[in-house]
Image: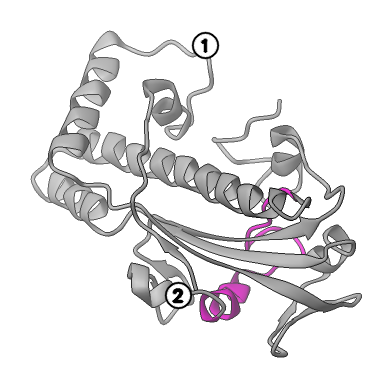
């Protein structure tokens, strides 16, 4: 099962601000932008990001109305995957993480009475996961292209039709432990700055715009990070 660690992430202030719930064009005090740039420098110099991707591409054995069967017979129950990926020839599963160092520093800032630094650094971590997710999609797309295939938009646990509990099955399908990702007793991933996804691989796979992804999210009416209007 492939594991990728040599990954370079380039983050911009605007991406961090979006993760603070501030949309493009929002007025932001100059000192906040300065602090974000300072924190980005700290992240780089202290090596707080340890990005890693574990993924695997499986032959789609069967895609029924409410479940998908992979080769070697593991199954994932999901009406969303079944409807969105019913034309897929293969199914790619990926787990991404930036590691535990950054969230450890976030906790230190809050414990030291510096909540603004903690909040902004947490936003940097979320922006880094977003960037890493895009890198995982690019990686799978490159693999698919060598066989003349395309990839669908990523589908994440927590979207309607794909329960968050599905993450337990997904982690078993890739080398999650090799990149330090596990599930807590409540079923959430640790380190917290991690993401899981499934993509369909095959001819003419469906891709959603960023607005359509937001429209499919359970939090579409309340999410401060929402992209669509």
- Judged from the image, the secondary structure of the residue bearing numbered disc 1 is loop
Q: Is residue 181 left or right of residue 135?
A: left
Distance in Å between CA atoms under marks 2 and 1: 41 Å
Residue 171 image point, x, y percent:
51, 75
Query: Which residue occupies the extreme front position in the image?
Result: 146
Query: Which residue occupies the extreme bottom position in the image?
Result: 73
Query: Do we see residue 213 in this rendering?
Result: yes
Q: Is residue 28 left or right of residue 92?
A: left
Q: Which residue is mark 1?
A: 25
Considering only vertical position in the picture, is 73 above or below 157?
below
Residue 173 image point, x, y percent:
57, 78
Q: Is residue 79 left or right of residue 29?
A: right
- Judged from the image, the secondary structure of the residue bearing numbered disc 2 is loop
Q: Is residue 225 left or right of residue 63?
A: left
Circle 1: is it few (<14), some (14-19), or many (20+) Cα within 10 Å?
Answer: few
Q: Which residue is mark 2?
A: 175
Start and end of the magenta stretch?
Answer: 151-172
Residue found 75% across the figure and 35% down from its top: 209
Considering only vertical position in the picture, is 98 above or below 31?
below
Q: Magenta span has 167? A: yes
Residue found 27% across the figure and 47% down from its top: 49
Considering only vertical position in the picture, is 157 above or below 214?
below
Picture colour scheme: one colour
Residue 131 image point, x, y percent:
47, 40
Q: Magenta span has 163? A: yes
- The image quadrant of residue 113 is top left
From the viewer's side, name the closer residue of 178 and 197: 178
- The image quadrant of residue 159 is bottom right
């Amino acid at each position: 099962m492939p594991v990728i660690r040599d990954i370079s992430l380039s983050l911009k202030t605007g991406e961090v601000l979006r993760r603070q719930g501030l949309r493009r064009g929002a007025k932001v005090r100059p000192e906040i932008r300065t602090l974000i740039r300072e924190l980005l420098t700290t992240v780089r110099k202290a090596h707080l990001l340890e990005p890693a991707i574990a993924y695997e591409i499986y032959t789609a054995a069967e895609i029924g109305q409410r479940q998908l069967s992979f080769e070697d017979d593991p199954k994932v129950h999901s009406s969303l995957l079944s409807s969105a990926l019913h034309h897929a020839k293969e199914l790619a599963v990926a787990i991404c993480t930036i590691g535990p160092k950054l969230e450890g520093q976030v906790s230190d800032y809050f414990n030291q009475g510096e909540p603004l630094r903690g909040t902004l650094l947490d936003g940097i971590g979320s922006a880094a996961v977003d960037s890493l997710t895009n890198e995982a999609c690019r990686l799978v797309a490159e693999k698919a292209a060598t066989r003349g295939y395309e990839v669908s938009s990523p589908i994440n646990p927590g979207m309607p039709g794909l329960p968050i509990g599905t993450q337990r099955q997904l982690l078993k399908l890739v080398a999650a432990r090799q990149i330090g990702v596990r599930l807590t007793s409540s079923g959430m991933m640790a380190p917290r700055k991690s993401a899981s996804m499934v993509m369909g691989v095959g001819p003419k796979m469906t891709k959603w715009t960023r607005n359509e992804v937001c429209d499919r999210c359970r939090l579409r009416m309340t999410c401060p990070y929402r992209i669509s209007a």
